[in-house]
Amino acid sequence: MKKDFNVLHLTILIIGLLMATTLSGCKDDDNPKPTEKGKVSDIDGNIYETISIGDQVWMKENLKTTRYADGSIIDYPGTDTAAWRTNTTGAYAWYNNDEANKDNYGALYNWYAVNNPQGLCPVGWRVSTSQDWAKMSTYLREEHNLTNDEADANALGNKLKSCLMLNSPLGGECATVVHPRWNYHEINYGTDDFGFSALPGGDRLFTGGFSSQGSFGFWWNSNDLDANLANRHYLNFDRSKLYGNTYLKNYGISVRCVKN
């Protein structure tokens, strides 16, 4: 009888441990980790990898759709600089008017495309807000003990950059001379610790010219301030910090989408 009791007791203990492990696994699934990846497609059929950072899900690539979510065509002024400068309904560009930059860096959208009611991101997704960037920054600083201090080479900006860089000290596939990649800097190079893979797509100026590919990655926030200015975030090839400030709405910069 005593032997039977011990066997029964051991069986109950094993079942309890198995149930605890199962419940623990479910809890982990409810809390995405920075290594979790997925995919999403836009109205044009472009497929983007996604990444979970904290409880947010981001595209890990810049948007490159040529149509709004409802299928409507986004204006493409191309080499018509006057049409680019005066557009207030939404427009996009490829850097240097070269579509080869589509797969490297995505499209450059003016803020009016971001704000267009027809929707720029895929259904169920939105253009990142200032609050989205702040939430990600807070999570990385508090949960991963990072700073956002440009004097710190290990600050979160360098952790968000793609490791692709001209002569990256990391070597291997990270060290490349071909685009897409960051310009060289001996201290402030990307390590892409969280899979965000930020790349320096540059911008299209309100005059229609282009600048900063390889040096700066700029991303619109959907928040605006007034008739002329909206918020953006950016990374610099020779700085370790993630910056946020305002930009003229008729400039063209990159877009990252966040899952609703």
Image (cartoon, grey):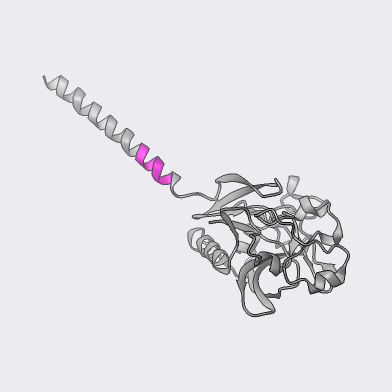
Vertical arrangement, residue 39 with respect to residue 2, above or below: below
Q: Residue 195 location in percent, x, y?
A: 62, 51
Which image quadrant is residue 93 in? Answer: bottom right
Q: Residue at x 65, y 55 (%)?
A: 69
Magenta span contains residue 24: yes
Task: Say which quadrant the N terminus sits in.
Answer: top left
Residue 81 or residue 15, whichever sits in front: 81
Q: Is residue 152 visible?
A: yes
Decide whether the magenta segment is chiefly helix, strand or loop. Answer: helix
Q: Residue at x 82, y 67 (%)?
A: 211
Which image quadrant is residue 236 in? Answer: bottom right
Which image quadrant is residue 8 in? Answer: top left
Q: Residue 188 location in percent, x, y?
A: 70, 62
Q: Residue 200 location in percent, x, y?
A: 74, 60
Relative horizontal placement of residue 123, taking residue 92 as reference (left or right): left
Q: Which residues are magenta?
A: 22-28
Q: Residue 156 location in percent, x, y?
A: 60, 62
